[in-house]
Amino acid sequence: MLLHGYGDVFQRRLGVGEKILVGPGGFLYKDSPVAICPVPVQAGAGFRNANWAELTGPGRVGIQSMNVHRHII
């Protein structure tokens, strides 16, 4: 398997009930036991109509440090 991410790619192992918030565009993958729940971004944060990803363990999650937005004109 080959995985490509922008910037640095991190893997984090979450314990039972441990939570992490991942910014828009930062989420790459998760193990099946990890729950994912959208959390709305606060107004003025620079993102429109976007959500943070709240990931709850147990399991591994993959995160990228940089996201790339492609705009269609």
Image (spheres, rainbow, N blue to C red):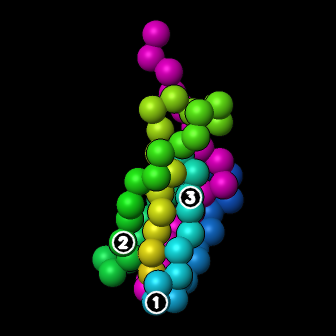
Q: Residue at x 58, y 77 (%)?
A: 12
User: Hey, which residue is sitting farthest top in the picture?
Assistant: 73
- Helix, strand or loop under label 3: strand
Identified by mark 3, the residue type is Val
64 is within the stretch colored magenta: yes
Cα–Cα gap, marks 2 and 3: 13 Å
Cα–Cα gap, marks 1 and 3: 18 Å
Query: Residue 35, which numbered label?
Result: 2
Query: Residue 16, which numbered label?
Result: 1
Front residue of this view, candidates 7 and 18 = 18
**The image quarter in which residue 49 lies:** top left
Compared across the picture, whether 29 is left or right of 67 comes to left
10 is within the stretch colored magenta: no
Q: Residue at x 52, y 68 (%)?
A: 62
Instruction: Answer with mark 1 or mark 3, whichever residue precedes in sequence.
Output: 1
Q: Relative to 48, does residue 22 appear above or below in the rendering? A: below
Identified by mark 1, the residue type is Val
Instruction: Answer with mark 2 or mark 1, whichever residue precedes in sequence.
Output: 1
Q: How many marks?
A: 3
Q: Residue at x 48, y 63 (%)?
A: 54
Residue 73 in picture, x, y percent from top left: 46, 10
Q: Relative to 2, does residue 44 appear above or below in the rendering? A: above
Front residue of this view, candidates 35 and 68 = 35
